[in-house]
Image (cartoon, rainbow, N blue to C red):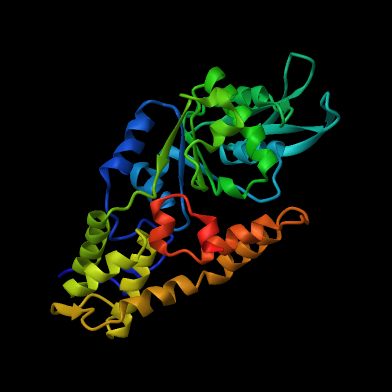
Amino acid sequence: MEAIHTVDAVFGVSRDLPLNYVSRDNVDGKLVDSLARQQHIVIYGSSKQGKTSLRKHCLQDSDYVVVACQNKWSLSELHSAVLKECGFTIRQSTEKSVSGKHKVVAEVEGKAKIPLISEAGGKAAYEYEKETGSTDTHVPLELDPDDTNDIIRALAEIDFSKYIVLEDFHYLPDDTQKDFSFALKTFHEKSRISFVIVGVWREENRLIGFNGDLTDRVLSVDVDTWTGDSLAAVIEAGGHLLNVQFDRGFVADLLQRCFDSVHIVQEACRRACRDAGIMQTQPDLAEVGAGVDIAALVSGVVDEQAARYRGFLNRFADGFQETDLEMPKWVIYALLCSTVEQLGSGPIDVRGAI
């Protein structure tokens, strides 16, 4: 008996790897090749284009730890979060670093923690019993969370060898992103630790722009490379799981209007199935999409994020400060008065728009 899948599980936004995931040689292959080179990797692209799915598809859960970045973190807080995910417990020390900030004490999490007294300076050490019956003794590390060298030393103490994934790196303040770009070079030069950085942006060399020394030390993978063939494969794979066949005209029109966005394709297929009364895998092959107004369907999907983009346009039009010519408003005006074809063909003649 074939497995039964719901429409939302196939075409909806999922926390797990999409059931109709399609591998792309120029994306998945590039990431696998980059992983083999043991370099730092940046996975970047627009929102909902498959960045997290790519990572989950190419890496086993046991190969990495994930740190979900927060919008108010400093470099020290980011480093502390990395240590926590790697198996340390963190508490604040009474000692201060040269910069005047409090240091932190990092202790390895383990079983059967027994306090001991070490010979060196009488500082407390801890003994952890392993499953084999042997024991390891670790001295709590007092370190400066702003100092990348201290973080490397702490991870070396536990022989950490997994990838460290920084999800939602774009959430971090710009200053923190810049500071970490310099820390990243130290991680590359002084350790075997590799980071996988996942962020929403379109600049291929964003981190290299912060720190030029990262050239050839950071490899970038762009997920926004969806082609008509790969998007059609996504639709076909989803249809197979639900035992439905999408109308050829529906598929052709959707691929023409989707702006090469896999999210628009997925959501449009989900809505088309639900509008046809299909909620799960069908016992008999069903036809979907004939006579559907694709323009209205895509417009409905895009409108869900309209407020987000209107907010960006308003903030951009306001500019950083008041000026006599108010050029940001004229730039937005030219963009809004241009067709999609004009925007995609190259530089816009602002004089023609005005």
- Write the residue at 75% across / 13% down: 120
- Write the residue at 27% across / 59% down: 231
- In the image, 152 versus 239, the foreground residue is 239
Query: Total of numbered circles in the picture?
Result: 0
- Whether residue 244 is visible, yes or no, is no
- Whether residue 343 is visible, yes or no, is yes
**Looking at the image, which residue sits at the far top?**
120
Residue 47 drawn at (x, y percent): 48, 56
Residue 133 drawn at (x, y percent): 49, 29
Rendered-image quadrant of the C terminus: bottom right
- 294 relative to 186, above or below: below
Residue 268: name its quadrant. Answer: bottom left
Is 254 left, or right, of 15 in this rendering? left
- In the image, 142 versus 331, the foreground residue is 331
- In the image, 1 versus 184, the foreground residue is 184
Residue 306 drawn at (x, y percent): 53, 71
- Write the residue at 70% across / 27% down: 140
Is 143 left, or right, of 335 in this rendering? right
Residue 160 drawn at (x, y percent): 51, 28
Residue 312: name its quadrant. Answer: bottom right
Rendered-image quadrant of the N terminus: bottom left
- 261 relative to 112, above or below: below
- In the image, 286 versus 85, the foreground residue is 286
